[in-house]
Image (cartoon, rainbow, N blue to C red):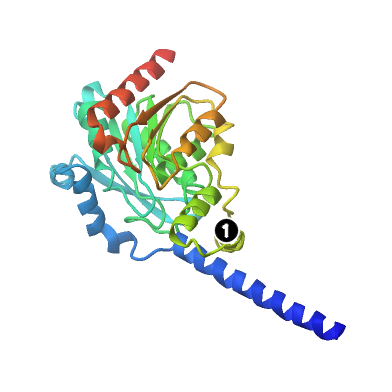
Amino acid sequence: MKRNSIRLLAVILTVLALNSCLAGKFMCNYSLTPKPHGVEDIERTRHKADSLMPGSTAWYDGLKAQGVLKDTTITGYNYKKVHAAYAPAKNPADAQGTAIVVHGYGDNHFVFLYLVRMYRDELNYNVLFPDLQYHGYSEGDAIQMGWHDRYDVEEWTRVAHDIFRDDFMVVHGVSMGGATVMMMSGDPQPYYVRAFVEDCGYSTVYDQFAYNLKQTFPFIPKDVLNSASYVCEQRYGWGFKEASSVRQLGLSVLPMLFIHGDADDFVQFSDLQRNYDAKTLGYKEMWIAPGAVHANSYAKYPQEYTQHVRDFLAKVKAMY
């Protein structure tokens, strides 16, 4: 009887382990390789850009037809070809600097054209806005959730500096782009990267997935994320817990503006305070957009959003 009980227990543990492994693979695939993506998803994201700010894609297409807006590619992290678009400031002779605008999960360089337009047309900045890996026109095996994307964005800062040759650069990201910015901020930066703006970025990939898992698959235990993280580490070289905005913010020394809508139910509003508190070095500001849902702060308060960014950058410039 004792031997049979041990065998039964072994079978049960094996089944549970296999189920956990299969669930982990499913969650990793579901989270990091959604379909459609990339070029197949361009039209949806162009429509999304216009829904956030009407006329965005017509503005984009007009600049491109004039030869003002151009495309470029580089070899990014893990030897993947990555794409970005760029354009000079509206008044190039009086450009105030360069802005790198980083998109969010499942989006691409089209979606946050409202920020590109804000920087170029209202703040008179040169702009460069990339497609992260597995998005838009960029290659990639999977979404990197900002963790490895930060290496590509760091390379894009060098490309932008070679193109525009100015010495004041701000990196601004929304959602996963905001997390990318925070993760990037903990790395050493060249002298011309002066400031960061993060909008509704998450604190860690693990905690973000745990929160979304509870929303989408409440019947799946949180422990499955450990298995999914292991799968991710084996496939892509990083785990969910190491991909931490909070940890990187603890190393961040450059000025940062934190933005979050207090009605955000996708990235928890509480992540704002957690991220803000994690940055203990260097200047920082926080702006809460009342009633704004996820990645909607600009759409709800375009003038206030622009003014907060303008004032923040003016303060940063006064520091140098």
Question: For numbered disc 1, what is the local secondary structure?
Answer: loop
- The structure residue drawn at horizontal position 58% and vertical position 57%, both measured from the top left corner, is 237
Q: Residue 257, relative to residue 13: is it above or below?
A: above
Q: Quadrant of the C terminus?
A: top left
> Which residue is painted at 20% across and 53% down in the image?
47
Q: Is residue 22 above or below residue 277?
A: below
Q: Quadrant of residue 14?
A: bottom right
Write the residue at 66% across / 77% down. Answer: 15
Residue drawn at point x = 36 percent, y = 22 percent: 313
Q: Position of residue 142 (x, y in %)?
A: 45, 60
Residue 210 visible at all: yes
Mark 1 neighbour class, 10 Å CA radius: few under 14, some 14 to 19, many 20 or more: some
Seen in the image, is 156 located left or right of residue 92? Answer: right
Question: Where, quadrant-wise, is the N terminus in this rendering?
Answer: bottom right
Q: Position of residue 164 (x, y in %)?
A: 32, 31
Q: Residue 267 vs residue 95: left or right?
A: right
What percent of the width, then of the height, locates residue 19? 60, 73
- Tell me which amino acid carries mark 1: Lys
Residue 87 in view (yes/no): no
Q: Nearest the camera: 182 or 264? A: 264
Q: Which residue is mark 1?
A: 222
